[in-house]
Amino acid sequence: MAQQDQVVEEKRSLVRILTLNRPRQLNALSFEMISRLLELLLRYENDSSVKLIIVKGKGRAFCAGGDVAAVVRDINQSGWRSGANFFYKEFFLNFLMATFTKPQVSFLNGIVMGGGAGASIHGKFRVATENSVFAMPETALGLFPDVGASYFLSRLPGFFAFGSDGISSPYNSKVEGKVMRFAHRLENSSVQGRSELPLLLIPKPTSNLLITDLILKSCIRKQKTKSLNFHGEYVGLTGARLDGAEMLACGLATHFVPSSRLSSLEEALCKIDSSDPTVISEIIDKYTQQPYLKDHSAYHRMDVIDKCFSRRTVEEILSSLERVGIDEADAWISDTVQTLKKASPTSLKISLRSVCVACF
């Protein structure tokens, strides 16, 4: 399939609609798709006639991730540089979407995994539906959540909050929020003490006195509020699948729109002549619906997630889950333990470390 056929461009007045078009492969990102998306977005960046970009997938998936099988095949045929080039371009695409000056609306009407998250979550608006299925399954494959996942997983609500205007901190300063998160992890760790604080990870210039003051204030604040959570660690380590309602609840999606209304929403968006996020958000709001979390949703187990996944190491997380499992005969806890035990130990350690470090 030609490169331009793998990503179909539709011009609608001041709006460009990009459709990922490999439905038989669940729109898995090929090198050609990534190259095509980069070409188009770089062109739109400097085109004053383009105000908004809509990205969607053909078939039952938005994008199931990178086409890893193709990458392995190319490496075997052409050497490691072909794989390095694939990931270089993919990560540059993630960066471009995160820093793009024009709003991107992604219709996540289906599977959104791995590289598919990288091609959508960094955009301004992420519209989930009842068909959405999100996951970062890398630890089960011997990899770790990449495509900027350590950034957005470490900023799920409780530490940072998502909104239609992007990512914002609920604290007075981002540094305070970062130190608060690490102080919480230390307090719940078997190894405690200020000496464990990785000072090199604190943004410069930040004095030791300020760091100490922030930790003290953070620990006091943590006792007064229940806003801190570790849902991102849970999602990143277990590869848990989230539906549209859960995506909205944790901030991975900015809106929830029934799939039956997506066509009408697309038509309404194509009539705008503005790049103002407020205007775009108001249009999407007209089609939104408040979904309900299912009874078996892991979101109802946030108390256990916070207690266990706030631990400093993978071993401590597993041990904490197993202790809770002794007290509670809960299939979700035992399933979570087994999922972690089946995953690559190295992948788990890298994933936990990356999310922890990314919050600084």
Image (spheres, grey):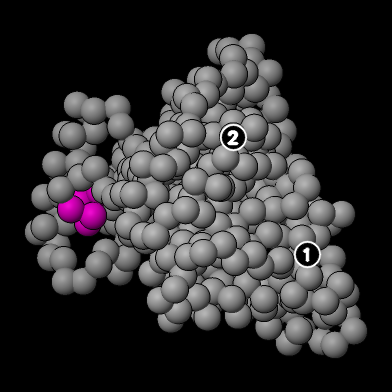
- Determine crowd level at label 2: few under 14, some 14-19, many 20+ residues with C-alpha closer than 10 A: few
Residue at left offset 77%, top offset 76%: 3
The residue at the point 53 percent across, 20 percent down is 292
* Quadrant showing the C terminus: bottom left
Query: Which residue bears the numbered disc 1?
Result: 67
Amino acid tagged 2: Arg
Give, as a single range, the part of the protein colored magenta: 173-177
Q: Distance between the residues labelled 2 and 1?
A: 30 Å
Dot 1 falls on a residue whose secondary structure is loop
Is residue 80 located in the magenta-colored stretch of the structure?
A: no
Q: In this view, does 235 lie to the left or right of 5?
A: left
| Residue 237: x %, y % from top left | 60, 45
- Which residue has dot 2 on it? 261
Say above or below: 359 vs 221: below
Percent position of residue 220, x then y: 16, 34
Q: Tell me the quadrant of the picture where the N terminus can be found.
A: bottom right
The chief SS type of the magenta part is helix
Q: Quadrant of residue 321?
A: top right
Q: Position of residue 301 (x, y in %)?
A: 51, 22
- On the question of residue 28 being in view, the answer is no
Residue visible at 22% across and 56% down in the picture: 175
Q: Residues within 10 Å of mark 1 (few under 14, many from 20)?
A: some
- Image coordinates of residue 30 in percent, x first then y, are 76, 70
* Dot 1 amino acid type: Asp
Residue at (64% x, 35% y) in the render: 259
